Image: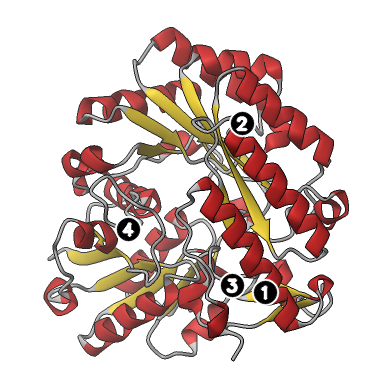
Amino acid sequence: MESKKVLLAEPLIKNPIKKQKNGKVADIGMRLGLAYLAGFLIDNCGKYDIIIKNYRFEEFLGNQRDLVHDLIGIDYLGITASSSEYPDALKMAKQAKAMGCIVIMGGIYPSSNPKEVLNTGYVDYIIAGEGEHAFLSLLNALSEQKLVNRIWTTGKNELIQNLDVLRPAYELLPMNEYCKYIAAPIYSSRGCSGQCDFCTLNQHWLNTHRCRSVDNVLREIRTLKEFGFTRINFKDESLTLDKNHAKQLFKALAQENFELNFKCKTRIDGIDKELLNIMKDANFEEIHFGIETLDDSTLELLHKNISKDEIIKKMELMLTMGFTINPSIILGNPGDTKESLKELADFIKNLYFTNPNKVKVYTCINTPHPGSVQYKKAKQKGITIIDSDLNNYTNFCLVSVPSSLGSTEQAIKIIAETQRDIVSSVNGPEPLININNFIK
C-alpha cells in the first residue's frame, strides 16, 4: 500500500522581533516540536512519508513560500501554532482544505481554544497538549477509516514518562544551514510545575516536569556538534527546576569538555552559588530568566514565589561570577503602578549601564493569551483587552492594560513611556509602542 504523505509545518508570523547576523529581523529558531513528532512517527510506524517545513527559516534564506506547490500530494497537514502564529496557520489550513488535505492542528493556541479552531471549518482535528502518541494514534485511526473524536487530548496519565524514547528527526531538517545562523536548541526536560499567572505553557504540560537521562542529552549534544554548531541553547522552561538532575547534567558537561558555549533558561529562584559554580565549569555563559517586576505585591499576584530583594541578590551573584544575564521584564502587569514601573525602569537602566556587556534585557508587554488564566479572568484581575488581533500577541506588543494604571488612555501612555525609556537606553530589539494606534 502506498505511504500516506504528512507535511508538518510552522506558520509565518507578521511581527518578528529578533535581529539576525545578516541584519534581517526574523524569528528563525529550529522548531523541535515538529522534529520530535516526525521522529516518533518514523521510529514507531513506517507507513508515512514525512516532510517538515519551517517557513520562517525558508523565508529568511530567501525562499518564498508556495503553499499550493507544497501541498500537492499531501494527505495530512499538521500545523503547530501559538497565538501570533494562529492567523497564518488558519490561512494554511484554508488552502489545504481547498486541496483536499486533512488538517490537524496542535500547539499552545489550538490546545487552549479547540472549539474555536474547529468552528472555523478549516481544521479537522486538534491535538491538545503533548502530541507524539496522540498524533500517531490519530493518523493510524484515520488510515484505518475508524470514526474518531475531533479533539485528541493527552491526559496527565498518558504523558510520556521516559523521554529518552523520543528524538528529533534531524535528518528532515537543513541542519547545515541552521548551524550558520543560530545556536542549536535542545531540551533536557519537558514542562514546568510553576504557577505563574500569565503563562500558558504550564497548562499545556499539565503542570508536570519530566527529565531526559543525562547520557541521552550528551548523545544529542555530540550529534549537534558534528553538524557544526558551536553554541547550544537549552530551551527547557526551567533547566534547574530539578536541581539534582541539573547538577548531574552540568558535571557531565564539564567532564565531557565539548568546547561549546551554553545558554539556558531557568527560574531565578532555582539559582544558587553551588549550582552556578558547576555551570561555570560546564562553560555556561548566559542565563535567561524572568523577573517580570520588582514590586513585591505584583510578584505575589503573579505567583512568582520570590521577592524583589531575592531577585536583586540572585542577579548580582550571577554577574559577580561572570555570567551574562538575560532578564525579561513585563510591563502592564495587574497591580503595576506608575511608581513601580519607574522603579523597574530605573533599576534596569542602572543594571545595564553598570554591566553594559553582561546584561541583555527583554522588555515584554503583558499579554493575556486566549485560553490562559489571565485571559479567562481578565475582568476579575482588572485587565482590559484593547487589541484582539492575534498577530500582535507576540509578548512585545501592547494588547492589554491593567486598571491599576488608571484609565485605559493613562495606562497606554504610561506603558508606552516606560517601554521607550528602557528600550532606548538598553538598545533592546523590541518595537516601540505607537500610542497613536490606540489614542486618537
Residue designated by label 2:
354
Disc 3 or disc 2, which is closer to the eye?
2
What's the distance in space between the residues labelled 2 and 4, CA to CA?
28 Å
Looking at numbered disc 2 in the image, what kind of residue is underneath it?
Answer: Thr
Residue designated by label 1:
413
Asked if residue 67 is positioned above or below residue 206 in the image, the reply reads below
What's the distance in space between the residues labelled 1 and 2, CA to CA?
28 Å
Count neighbours of disc 2 (C-alpha within 10 A) and say few if under 14, some if 14 to 19, many if 20 or more. few
Give percent across and percent down for residue 429.
45, 54
What's the distance in space between the residues labelled 4 and 1, CA to CA?
26 Å
Looking at numbered disc 4 in the image, what kind of residue is underneath it?
Answer: Val
Q: Secondary structure at mark 2?
A: helix
Disc 2 or disc 4, which is closer to the eye?
2
Left or right relative to 176: residue 15: right
Write down the quadrant of residue 271 in the picture.
top right
Residue designated by label 3:
398
Give percent across and percent down for residue 243.
67, 25
Name the N-terminal-most of marks 2 and 4. 4
What's the distance in space between the residues labelled 4 and 3, CA to CA?
19 Å
Question: Which residue is the extreme one toward the top?
Answer: 255
Q: Which mark is residue 25?
A: 4
Residue in the image at 49% along x and 82% along y:
117
Residue in the image at 72% along x and 69% along y:
374
Asked if residue 347 is positioned above or below residue 206 in the image, the reply reads above
Left or right relative to 284: residue 94: left
Count neighbours of disc 3 (C-alpha within 10 A) and say few if under 14, some if 14 to 19, many if 20 or more. many
